[in-house]
Image (tube, rainbow, N blue to C red):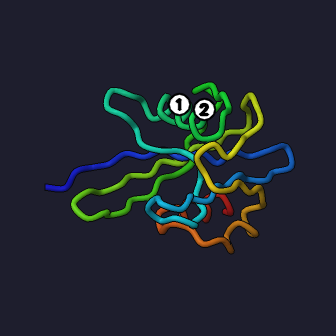
Amino acid sequence: MTVIFPVVAAALIDEAGHILMQRRPEGKALAGLWEFPGGKVECGESPEAALCRELDEELGIIVAPGDLSPVTFASQPLGDRHMILMLYRCRRWSGDPQALEAAELRWGDADSLAALPMPAADVPLLAALRS
């Protein structure tokens, strides 16, 4: 039996239209790859609440659930689990994003970010933002 593993991610978009990506730190799975910030949805948590929590933990920013707009999702097998990665667009938050858990942050347009090495599940998410 396959276990479904829900994960949420944010495309934080600034006033200039740049998107924020973070690089996974050494010592973690997929270290060095670039991804959208976010993380696991805990039991009993809505995807929006999970994403607001994760953005606070990872970037030190505050996001209201109402400022998240669903964009698309990716489906990726991970051994005996299957990840569903839900991407939300966010254009409003409080605070300046900081790399609290990531090795590095980078802002860029969708075309320049597409050149970065990413986990397989993040690639179609960025493509959806480009179209």
Q: Which residue is drawn at 42% across and 42% down?
A: 40
Left or right of residue 59, residue 45 in this image = left
Q: Residue at x 64, y 55 (%)?
A: 22
Helix, strand or loop under label 1: helix
Q: In this view, does 9 lie above or below 111?
A: above
Label 2 and label 1: CA atoms lie apart by 5 Å
Amino acid type at image mark 1: Arg
Helix, strand or loop under label 2: helix
Residue 57 or 131: which is nearer the viewer? Answer: 57
Q: Position of residue 105 (x, y in %)?
A: 70, 54
Image quadrant in which you'd find residue 78: bottom left
Q: Where is residue 75 in the image (x, y as percent from the top left)?
A: 39, 59
Image quadrant in which you'd find residue 57: top right
Q: Give the position of the N terminus as an image quadrant.
A: bottom left
Label 2 with label 1: CB-CB less than 8 Å: yes
The number of numbered discs placed on residues in the rendered structure image is 2
Left or right of residue 6, residue 8 in this image = right
Image quadrant in which you'd find residue 100: top right
Q: Give the position of the C terminus as an image quadrant.
A: bottom right
Left or right of residue 120, residue 25 in this image = right
Amino acid type at image mark 2: Asp
Residue extending farthest front: 27
Residue that label 1 marks: 53
Residue that label 2 marks: 56
Residue 129's label in the rendered image is none
Judge the density around disc 2: few (<14), some (14-19), many (≥20) Cα neighbours within 10 Å: some
Residue extending farthest right: 16
Q: Position of residue 77 (x, y in %)?
A: 31, 64
Q: Residue at x 65, y 40 (%)?
A: 59
